[in-house]
Amino acid sequence: MTDDAKQLLLRCFEGDKASWDRFVQDYAGLIYHTIKKTLALHRGSTAADSAEDIFQDIFLSLVKDEFSQLRRFRGDNGCTLASWLRMIAARRTIDHLRKSNQAANPLEESVLDGLADESENEGSNEQLQLLASVLPEIQPGERIIIDLFFRQNLSAPDVASILHLSIGAVYTQKSRILAKLRETLEKTGPL
């Protein structure tokens, strides 16, 4: 953890309003963006009402009981405050979705939208169609791992923390998913 982040947190814990305002200003966008991306990943939409509710819940939980949750941040193993808050936001969003018993929509649209943005200039409609034909072979839980690793570029420890899995389990699942994709693509043809 940087000295600046450490000092900011200490001032927040002491009740300094200006420091809390700075904390909110520095991290509100990151938290809200993570909530919206996680909702989009699981629902195929960004449901603004849910995002606002989750956003408020996260900030309330951070200040609750004299910042007890925020005090748990240690910055161990190179974990930054931003990555820790991103994990908190993703977990809280997933928990919200589980509690509300809303079925997660298939992620084909979300993944294809991201790929379409990247490949618009290349005119690779054939590749997108091939990928669209492969994605139904991937389970929703596996799609989450694909998104966290490859679209959000998170590390294995971050993915493990978000999904409440061991790092070994994350690597095993990632390998299995990639093998399944390779096998499906070999049957269909090369990209």
Image: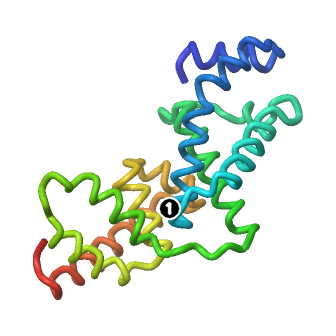
Residue 107 seen in this snapshot: yes
Label 1: how many Cα within 10 Å (few below 14, some 14–19, many 20+): many
- The answer to which image quadrant residue 143 occupies is bottom left
Please determine whether, in this image, residue 117 is positioned above or below residue 168.
above
Q: Could you tell me which residue is drawn at 63 percent across and 46 percent down?
A: 89
Pick the front one: 47 or 38: 47
Label 1 sits on a secondary structure element that is helix
Horizontal placement of 17 versus 43: left or right?
right
Location of the C terminus by quadrant is bottom left
Q: Residue furthest bottom?
A: 187
Please determine whether, in this image, residue 138 is positioned above or below residue 173.
below
Image spot of residue 68 (x, y percent): 81, 35
Image spot of residue 56 (x, y percent): 76, 42
Image spot of residue 37 (x, y percent): 51, 52
Q: Residue furthest right?
A: 65
Q: Could you tell me which residue is drawn at 75 percent across and 37 percent down?
A: 59
User: Badge 1 is on which residue?
Assistant: 41
Residue 76 seen in this snapshot: no
- The answer to which image quadrant residue 180 occupies is bottom left
Label 1 is placed on what type of residue? Answer: Leu
Q: How many marks?
A: 1
Image spot of residue 81 (x, y percent): 57, 31
Location of the N terminus by quadrant is top right
Q: Could you tell me which residue is drawn at 48 percent across and 54 percent down?
A: 159
Horizontal placement of 13 versus 150: left or right?
right
- The answer to which image quadrant residue 186 occupies is bottom left
Q: Could you tell me which residue is drawn at 10 percent across and 76 percent down?
A: 190
What color scheme is it? Answer: rainbow
